[in-house]
Amino acid sequence: MAKMPKTLQTIIIEQVEPELDGGRYPIKRIAGETLEVTADIFKEGHDTINAILRYKISGEKIWNETPMSHVDNDRWAGSFLLSDNTRYIYTVGGYVRSYETWRIELEKKHAAHLDVSSELLEGHAQVKHARTRAKGSDKATLTTWLDQWRQARDQESLMAIALDPQLRTLMDQHEHRAVWSLYDRELAVTVDREQARYSAWYEIFPRSEGTIEGQGGTFKDCEARLPAIRDMGFNVLYLAPIHPIGETNRKGRNNSLTAGQGEPGSPWAIGSQHGGHDAIEPALGTLEEFDAFQQAVRNHGMELAIDFAINATPDHPYVTQYPTWFKRRPDGTIKFAENPPKKYEDIYAFDFYSLAWQGIWQEMKRVLLFWINHGVKIFRVDNPHTKPVMFWEWLIEEIQQDHPDVIFLAEAFTKPKMMRVLAKAGFTQSYTYFTWRNSPQEITEYFTELTQSKMQDYFRPNLFPNTPDILPDILQQGGRPAFKFRFVLAATLSPAYGIYNSYELCENNAVPGTEEYHNSEKYEIRHWDWDRPRNIRDYITRINHIRRDNPALHSFTNLQFHQTNNTHILFYSKITTDKQNMLLFVVNMDPYAMQEARLTIPLKELGIQETAPYQLHELIQDYRHDMTGREYIIRLDPNHEPATIFVVHS
Amino acid sequence: MAKMPKTLQTIIIEQVEPELDGGRYPIKRIAGETLEVTADIFKEGHDTINAILRYKISGEKIWNETPMSHVDNDRWAGSFLLSDNTRYIYTVGGYVRSYETWRIELEKKHAAHLDVSSELLEGHAQVKHARTRAKGSDKATLTTWLDQWRQARDQESLMAIALDPQLRTLMDQHEHRAVWSLYDRELAVTVDREQARYSAWYEIFPRSEGTIEGQGGTFKDCEARLPAIRDMGFNVLYLAPIHPIGETNRKGRNNSLTAGQGEPGSPWAIGSQHGGHDAIEPALGTLEEFDAFQQAVRNHGMELAIDFAINATPDHPYVTQYPTWFKRRPDGTIKFAENPPKKYEDIYAFDFYSLAWQGIWQEMKRVLLFWINHGVKIFRVDNPHTKPVMFWEWLIEEIQQDHPDVIFLAEAFTKPKMMRVLAKAGFTQSYTYFTWRNSPQEITEYFTELTQSKMQDYFRPNLFPNTPDILPDILQQGGRPAFKFRFVLAATLSPAYGIYNSYELCENNAVPGTEEYHNSEKYEIRHWDWDRPRNIRDYITRINHIRRDNPALHSFTNLQFHQTNNTHILFYSKITTDKQNMLLFVVNMDPYAMQEARLTIPLKELGIQETAPYQLHELIQDYRHDMTGREYIIRLDPNHEPATIFVVHS
């Protein structure tokens, strides 16, 4: 039989927004933001209702409340400040405003010249009840009202007392919440720190920071390079794995199956006699030297991100310590990682379906806490899409409960739904398909999805035009012009982006027919000449300064695309809500030829009258155009300047 | 701390469709339909997975299963037959196909010329395990395979055995469902009988069926009219309330506050010394006569619908039996129903917030069961939007659990979100805004929402062009042409519609400035002359025959609108999925003037080649046009024929 409810929570509360998958996953926001919550809230009959937005920090007992207001058509809206970097819970409640319901009916009846003496008695009873709930001066005031009421001689004087606005206010304050009804779900919002939204990453292999040819770099060498990285305008320094590298089946130069004498192996082959995930590769330095380096990064106004890759070489301490964590072949030996026919002979994959899976989960948590205790608050997670999503959901919530400032970047380049569910499950930021979106149309479609769909509530793109694994075709072929405009796109489409070092050198030497770097740092020690001719360090520095100085670039969902008459030209804008900072971007995505386009300046969005003068101030080259009207013709020569950033002064 | 799960249900199952408000409410379907279910289903890593659609009749223990198949981009689809008129529960599960995963990897490795001897041993172990699960001839076959395997001398023969399609099929059948994962919600679908979707209602006041002037009609009189109603093509006969009418404050003719001697009162003023909701107004007959009439209706191929109005006159037995069910004034008297400043002096409203609310719920259930036991399976529920929605949700589920064939029509003309939530809460059919949608644009917008939005899953419109409470302006002003085209719209836009009697007489005599009928049957006994000049009985009969003969008119969501170049002309189509029945409708919604429109026949939707000949057969007037191409010019004179229905023969 259908269950009869215990209480009459009859106010309908539904279509609560934002809400992700019926409340299954938290949405994401940044500390300091205001969360706007809307809902359909209504009740049968003619009662006047109020709606309340409830919120609290997860784990707290007491709800905070803020009133919602009616927008239209039974839609209500309210908001609260997400002041802290933590997880908040929110929900919505509603109740009948008994006194207001009564007052409105009284006025209607009185206006229709009906006898309201019985209604006045009902109101009097409500005021008496309210007095029992009131305290102090409110109680005294209500007592005075009740006295006046008793002394009133006729219906008109009673009406005047009943409808007094001051009494109404007092009655609202001491409202008995009749028919109190609560939304049947509690929704969560993960509130991250600013760094989660706005950051510029720079990725290095510490061992390539050495200054003596043929000799690997150390944390000390890395420290020497911090001023240069900071001066380019980056604020997250991301290190390829820093743990001891295995000896067994160590990979050689250019991913060869055997390493020659002295070859360093892939840093993703974690674990040796020197330790595993909580140890430092001795060639880089000691744990104490790591700590000092971490502090030095902070002293340079930047923050360290390290790599979190769950795999182990045959030499990893786990292999003997936790033999059940790895999948075995029928002959009892452990299986190497593989993605047939590809094989990774230098590492074992963890068996997340072993009976000991809970041990793996707990140990991974311990490893993260180890590095958190060493000051690391940002983890770039390697291949999360090959581990159970529920593992990440547990791990990230578990870590962020005590360390809400920890940021996780999902390095998943995989199918769209897996990309999305990893973000829903908790990853703070995500890698994207940006790396391969090469036409204005592709960019427009992809970024419209990212900024306009539900994804805007949980998926924070971190745009990388290159990674150690991906030197995309557009950079291989397009050369320096492509490096320039892909950088502008990454740095301005999203407030979070990053490059893998050598990008500033326009390094585009690939293994033919692949996206792999030739002589990849993954397998050997490199020595980069940071002053190499035709580098774009100054260009990067300039764009990062523009990012810093223009608050419109600190948001993502303010991205708007505009039409042009040239399919090679991407035209977009970013405008702050208060219109104090308005930017227009025009990018020629053809690295080979000059392109010209007729732009229609979006005057309405810029709040500029059709006939009013305004100025376009180009920020890369610093020139100014005085303008009236919508039409602007632009010519972009990739070999000269493929991108233009205008700040609009009106 | 975040909770560590107990089992590894790591297959992601989300975005299940259809699903209403995160599974909060059931969707609706009709017995005999197939329910298509789709979902995003995927897993980390590279395992091959299978997805399963599970379903059962609500309350049953054992799930039925049917395989789903992969559509694209991790979207899976499956379906099952909703054979019974009952409530089904469905959900989705997924698992890893261990053998298939192994087989695919084996083939890849073999193709890459890798040694697969270890892999072959793994496959052998899987077959051995499968044999423990298999029975009978399957077990024997697997044993034979294992023998062959043992006898095989080299890797190539082993490969041939391992990849044998017959073994693959057997292994699929005896699959051990590794990593079995279940969607975290169970979804419900209310499966109604055909009548819930396709029905033509005819509403009468039984007391007006008398044949002797000045004397009220009885069930006997009603019975005499059944052949005429049936012959017009109606299949639901809906009676205004048939219960004893109160004496106290009885309403007089045209809603006057006092009834003269012999005036019958409003049938919605339920309850007298003769009984209440489970009694029959003595003037109409006895309960036995009602039973006989109910049977007579069935014998005429129709079904009875009665009114369910929850209110009571001061003379209702409930008033003394359940004094706490009614709201009292400060002086202890019971409050009359009101919607200030409107008052309903002849009835009390129930107080659904009284402490005895559960008693009201149970008694209302008893009343419904009483009439169900007297053969009534359709209830038109009066003003459901003034009672708690959760009451209806409970009541309808409670009734339909034992009587799934019972149909509830929600008579709510109120704000859109309340209309929707009543349907979600369980009402089988709903009244609509159709009654006031008077332009092709309004009809197009409203019916696009009804057929294309989520509403299609739960909101079944029953279109009434008039009701005893609503004689809309378009009928008052537009006269006979309006009566004709509003009828065509009601009867063809939706498979469920109804009229209140006198519509066929084009009765449009209203209380000036209102939508109330002058001399409304609500307050007096009427005697209608069914042969009144200029009646449209034959027209109604014709349209109902067209409905019966054309299956395209038995569906709702197949409604498609098409553009015309005249804002008075509505052009729409209904086509069966198999394209065996294709109808085009052209309606001039201007009752005052001839309108001409250039139509573009939707050849593509009709499956007709651009140059192919086809025929438009007009069904109301029975003429035929031989056609080629898209263009058709139509002229509709409201005084002659405001609507055209073409069946397309190609």
Image (cartoon, coloured by chain):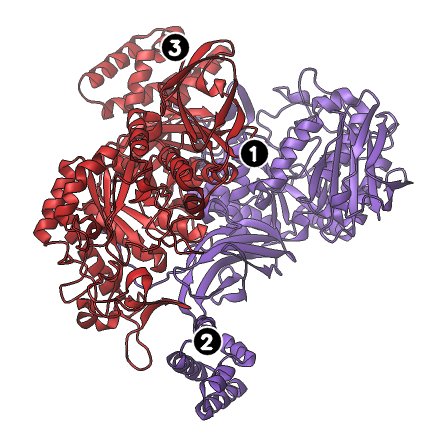
Chain colours: A purple, B red
Which chain letter matches label 3?
B
Residue at the disc numbered 2: A110
Same-chain check, marks 1 and 3: no
Q: Which amino acid does label 2 sit on?
A: His
Numbered badge on residue A482: none
Give percent across and percent down for residue A334.
46, 28
Q: Decide: few, some or many residues near mark 2? Use Cα within 10 Å; few <14, some 14-19, many ≥20.
A: some
Helix, strand or loop under label 3: helix
Q: Which of marks 1 and 2 is nearer the N terminus?
A: 2
Numbered badge on residue B159: 3
Q: What residue type is labelled 3?
A: Met
Marks 1 and 3 sit apart, C-alpha to C-alpha, by 32 Å
Q: Which amino acid does label 1 sit on?
A: Asn
Q: Nearer the viewer, mark 1 or mark 2?
A: 2
Same-chain check, marks 3 and 2: no
Question: Which residue is situated farthest in the front direction here?
Answer: B533
Front residue of this view, candidates A194 and B286: B286
* Residue A502 visible, this orientation: no
Residue at the disc numbered 1: A383
Marks 3 and 2 sit apart, C-alpha to C-alpha, by 93 Å
Helix, strand or loop under label 2: helix
The structure residue drawn at horizontal position 23% and vertical position 70%, both measured from the top left corner, is B248
Q: Is residue A37 above or below residue B61?
A: below
Which chain letter matches label 1?
A
* Residue A5 visible, this orientation: yes
Front residue of this view, candidates A167 and B469: B469
Q: In this view, does A517 lie to the left or right of A182?
A: right
Which chain letter matches label 2?
A
Q: Is residue B525 left or right of residue A573?
A: left
